[in-house]
Image: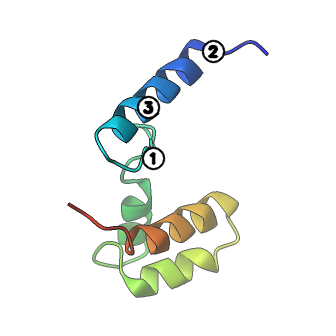
């Protein structure tokens, strides 16, 4: 299996985060804030419970995935 340079850098970043006691979740810079932007475009004041519910019911699979992650992220222990 031929690993790309990006795969290796993501794995390295995950490993570094794990050593720091963090979750190891890596979100691409191009995707950061995209669900918040979608929520605001729908008329919400950011990521709210209502926005997450609407996102989970969306026809777009990418939005559904982001909404599911947003719902799970609310339960994370933020330090």
Q: Quadrant of the N terminus?
A: top right
Query: What residue is disc 1 on?
Result: 25
Viewer-nearest residue: 5 or 53: 5
Viewer-nearest residue: 78 or 57: 78
Viewer-nearest residue: 37 or 71: 71
- The CA distance from mark 1 to mark 2 is 19 Å
Check contact, mark 1 vs mark 3: CB within 8 A: no
Tell me the mark number nearer the camera, choosing from 1 and 3: 3
Tell me the mark number nearer the camera, choosing from 1 and 2: 1
Query: What residue is disc 2 on?
Result: 4
Query: What residue is disc 3 on?
Result: 15
Identified at 54% across, 19% down, the residue is 8
Could you tell me residue 49's position as x and y percent? Answer: 41, 85
Which badge, 1 or 2, is on the more N-terminal residue?
2
Could you tell me residue 26's position as x and y percent? Answer: 44, 41
Could you tell me residue 9's position as x and y percent? Answer: 47, 20
């Amino acid at each position: 299996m031929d690993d790309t340079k990006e795969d290796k850098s993501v794995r390295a970043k995950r490993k570094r985060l794990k050593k720091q006691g963090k979750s190891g979740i890596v979100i691409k810079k191009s995707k950061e804030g995209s669900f918040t932007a979608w929520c605001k475009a729908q008329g919400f004041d950011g990521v709210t419970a209502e926005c997450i519910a609407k996102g989970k019911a969306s026809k777009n699979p990418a939005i559904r995935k982001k909404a599911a992650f947003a719902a799970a992220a609310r339960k994370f222990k933020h330090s």
